[in-house]
Image: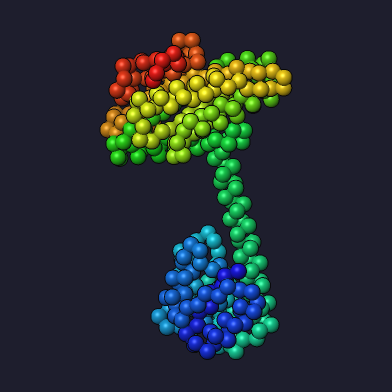
Amino acid sequence: MKILLADDDRVTRRLMESQLRRWGYKVMEAEDGEGALDILARPDGPRLAVLDWMMPKLDGAEVCRRLRAVGREDYVYVILLTSKNRKEDLAAGLEAGADDYVAKPFDHVELRARLRVGERMVGFSQGLLSANAMLRTLALTDELTGLLNHGAILARLREEHARTSRTGLPLGVLMVDIDHFKAVNDSLGHAAGDLVLKRVAGAIRAACRPYDVVGRYGGEEFLVLMPVTDGSHALAVAERIRDSVASAPVSEGDRELRVTISLGVSVLRGGAPSSPEGVLEAADRALYKAKNAGRDRVCSSGLDLHEAPDAGYDGSGPV
């Protein structure tokens, strides 16, 4: 485990460094408070620190104070080394943000015991961070498909709409719906329906670029956001997704299910008088047009597509 040792006295640093290395720590050193704060502020900096109270530029208590003021998630456990022994001084150090203190000259057994407490606290903090990260992921993710859930994909739509308005670069939006999905659930059961949903989600994800955003909009509907994408490319991606799903039946036991999807496409360009809801409604209208035209096809809304309005693609020719 990495540890920061900050002390302006070279002899003390050498003695402590030798002891810390024997205990298995990877020691990073600083000879003043500014250097200590710089090391602790690094993303890969140590999460355990032993700071001398009296140092040039910034003393140990001030380093603690500034470190805590940042309010970082990954907690740094700080032990102050001090020759101060008045209760008022020790209380001031703890109030500044130190977690513990060791009096000079330090006792090896005592220091080791206090460092072990620090290790446990850092480990506990890292465990909480991992748990919180997992909870954040779960809060944004559709459990079945692994895509963004309804709330998360709409939040990203608002973000991408704002980016397009700011930069003037186009945003392609695809609304995808699985054809006759209710019949799959009714005739074959929800397990088969889940297989179909995962298969379609995988096909959509495989056809998109790493920075495109894919979410499960609800039920059997999916939403795809494609930054910096004009109408012709959005239609080409939509057709690729449609063909990928239609050409690969889903195996369920000894049966093969032929699955098709319908897709609606709209494209927003910067400066266009629209809202996130307007772009979504345009893609939704195009989707229903595709379904009313016979399903298993792609239709566009004609919104800033630079193709003929209401263009339709049924997979019979090049996009």
* Residue 267 shows in this picture: no
Quadrant of image for the N terminus: bottom right
In the rendering, at what x and y percent does residue 85 appear? 58, 87
Quadrant of image for the C terminus: top left
- Rendered image quadrant of residue 57: bottom left
Query: Does 1 sit left or right of 170 as displayed?
Result: right
Residue lying at 61% horizontally and 56% vertically, measured from the top left = 128
136, above or below 10, in the image: above
Q: How is the image coloured?
A: rainbow
In the rendering, at what x and y percent does residue 258 appear? 60, 17
- Rendered image quadrant of residue 102: bottom right
| Residue situated in front as seen by the camera: 77 or 230 | 230
Residue lying at 31% horizontally and 20% vertically, measured from the top left = 307
Of all residues, the one furthest to the right in this rendering is 254
| Residue situated in front as seen by the camera: 121 or 269 | 269
| Residue situated in front as seen by the camera: 71 or 202 | 202
Residue lying at 50% horizontally and 13% vertically, measured from the top left = 295
* Residue 44 shows in this picture: yes
- Rendered image quadrant of residue 271: top left
